[in-house]
Image (cartoon, helix red, strand yellow):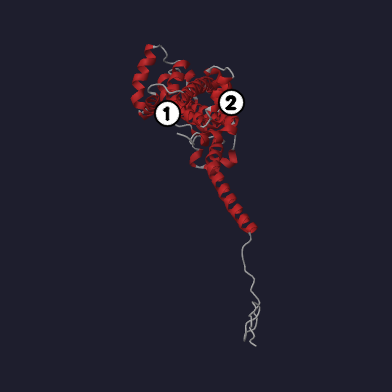
Amino acid sequence: MSTTTVDTPGAVAGQDSVPAQPRTARSRGETGRATRLASHGILVVASLIALFPVAWLVFLSLGPDKDDYLHPGRIWGKMTLDNYTFVLEHTKFFDWLLTTMIVTLGTTAIGVIISATTGYAVSRMRFPGYKKFMWVLLITQMFPVAVLMVPMYQILSDLQLIDTYPGLVLVYCSTVVPYCAWLMKGYFDTIPFEIDEAGRVDGLTPFGTFARLILPLAKPGLAVAAFYSFLTAFGEVAFASTFMLSDTKYTFAVGLQTFVSEHDAQRNLMAATAVLIAIPVSAFFYFVQKNLVTGLTAGGTKG
């Protein structure tokens, strides 16, 4: 009678059983912790790099002398707010503020309205030449400012809009509307067309559908368009310095140039003015920042 021997996993003939060595593996928690520390470190460094120019500008604005930027270490012992006092009391800062706010808010409001209606019309309506129309808007962005300056000046002169707020707002709208129309068109493409059909079923007119149903859903896109329009009008120099002739109607961007002449440069006053100028921009950014990130990313999902 034959017998069959079965080897068990724990023992082999002629060999002693060796206990298995524990496998050293990095736990998932340790990997996640290291990744978080590295990412946080990178973000901290990037934040410091981004904030350094702002902090440096504020630091230079506290130096009382115009040449302190050449020896910044000397500012520590003589910091003062006299630069801000001089700018607010002995320059046309508040005139520049009034002009900047009128022109910037006017450009933002008119530009967003025109670009939103244009983008919605091209996104939803199929009229002859609608694709070519959008390309024409894009082509207008190809011309440099130097080429547009002379014909725009002639047009504004014929309309008697030189050195006026409406004239500068009109010029800025011609700059911001083409880009914002493309932006809004891309964002409206991401909103389902069924919403328009539901509005018509409920008896809304096309404009009523646009105003009551589509615009509330397009707030992120509108925020991006408003932010772009605001920054473009706020920081533009060439058109403002050409079309606004009175020193009381300078914008902030043009007003900063008054601190630099051929033989002198009051950089301490320029730094203080720049810090004050940043306040309206920061306030506007805080107002729209909730919808800004969403609007920047959503418009690219459809063509």
Nearest to the observer: residue 130 or residue 23? 130
Residue 3 can be seen, yes or no: yes
From the image, tell me which residue sits under label 2.
216
Q: Residues within 10 Å of mark 2 (few under 14, many from 20)?
A: few
Residue 173: image x %, image y %? 45, 22
Amino acid type assigned to the residue bearing label 2 in the image: Pro
Quick check: 131 above or below 40? Answer: above
Instruction: Please give the name of the residue rendered at 50% of the width and 31% of the height, measured from the top-left corner.
Output: 187
From the image, tell me which residue sits under label 1.
261
Mark 2 residue element: helix
Residue 260: image x %, image y %? 44, 30
Split into 4 quadrants, where in the image is the N terminus? bottom right
Furthest residue toward front = 1
Amino acid type assigned to the residue bearing label 1 in the image: Ser
Asked if marks 2 and 1 touch (Cβ < 8 Å), the reply is: no
Quick check: 177 above or below 49? Answer: above
Q: Which mark is residue 299?
A: none
Q: Residues within 10 Å of mark 1 (few under 14, many from 20)?
A: few
